[in-house]
Image (cartoon, grey):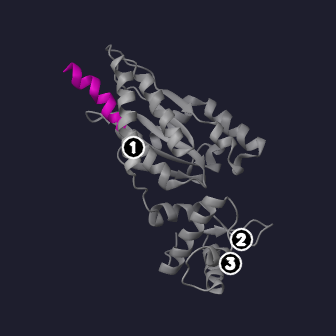
Amino acid sequence: MEALTARQQFILNLLVEAHIASAQPVGSRYLTERFQVPYSAATVRHEMGMLEEMGYLTHPHTSSGRVPTDTGYRYYVDHGLVPATPSQQDSSDFESWQQEIRQEAQGGDLEACAEEALRILTALSEEVGLVVLGEGWPERAETQRPVKLLIRGTTHLIEKPEFQDRHKIRNLFEAFEEKRAISQWVTHETAEQGISVRIGCENEPEALRECSIISASYGAQKRHAGVIGVVGPRRMNYGRGIAAVAGMARLLEQIIQWPQEETE
């Protein structure tokens, strides 16, 4: 991955965010007229050409505008993304959600807690949500449970312009049905700490190469309990997705520790 100048990075970040918002190829004139760009349209056009030569951008043959490549998205996520900051309303909602999920935990149905967390996650991110309940997921009874994958919000994908092709969406849904393979892969690719972001061609299952996956592991007492994450198009809102996944991972950690603490 070639290093970018400050100007190239600025233009790349702006173009990625414009494409995420519009789902359309982005041209130099659009950037200079729509945003406060301190460069002329000719300069922006030249730099976009350079970014394309370096592999960060490409352009559909039917348009003069550009779209990010997987490399472009990767650079944006690693170097240009500004993390979403939770608003006061978000903090209030989070406390309310925590109370709702704790009520589920009081009944001893921890899988229902995960289902509720998944429902909240899909609403926050507007993407498909998934949660892996690993062998370390605590139970009231002293039993080991098999790894299980829960998926919710697949209708969000159908609404995306990228997945209007029936062949693409069918392949993706078929991949979701291979729950054991998906759960093993996403668990293997998720770091034990922090947020993992896999973009396009970085995803091993071929059907997921049209997607990006944001995931985080959660656990209790240094024990890996599972993974929670979202699946969406490469043109997903990464800032919103990362914030939602991080928040739900923290919440699940608190919930799975809670019944243990209560019984100690």
Locate residue 209 relative to residue 225 in the image: left or right: right
The residue at which mark 2 appears reads as: 65
Residue 24, horizontal then vertical, whole percent: 70, 62
Name which of mark 3 and mark 1 comes first in the sequence: 3
Q: CA distance from mark 3 to mark 2?
A: 9 Å
Q: CA separation, marks 2 and 1? A: 36 Å
Spatial CA distance of label 3 from label 1 is 38 Å
Residue at x 47% of width, y 62% of height = 81
Residue 260 forms part of the magenta stretch: yes
Q: Main secondary structure of the magenta part?
A: helix
Give the residue at x 45% y 66%: 79
Residue named by callout 3? 29
| Residue marked by disc 1 | 247
Residue type at mark 2? Answer: Gly
Q: Which residues are magenta?
A: 251-264
Q: Amino acid at mark 3?
A: Arg
Q: In the image, is 57 to the left or to the right of 130?
A: right
Q: Quadrant of the C terminus?
A: top left
- Using the image, determine if residue 163 lies above or below residue 154: below
Instruction: State yes or no: discs 3 and 1 in contact (Cβ < 8 Å).
Output: no
In front of the other: 235 or 223: 235
**Mark 3 falls on what kind of element?**
helix
Task: For marks 3 and 2, give the one nearer the viewer.
Answer: 3
Q: Secondary structure at mark 1?
A: helix
Q: Amino acid at mark 1?
A: Gly
The answer to whether residue 18 is above or below residue 46 is above
Mark 3 is surrounded, within 10 Å at the Cα level, by few (under 14), some (14 to 19) or many (20 or more) other residues, namely: some
First in residue order: circle 3 vs circle 2: 3
Q: Earlier in the sequence, mark 2 or mark 1?
A: 2
Question: Pointer 2: residues within 10 angstroms few (<14), some, or many (20+)?
Answer: some
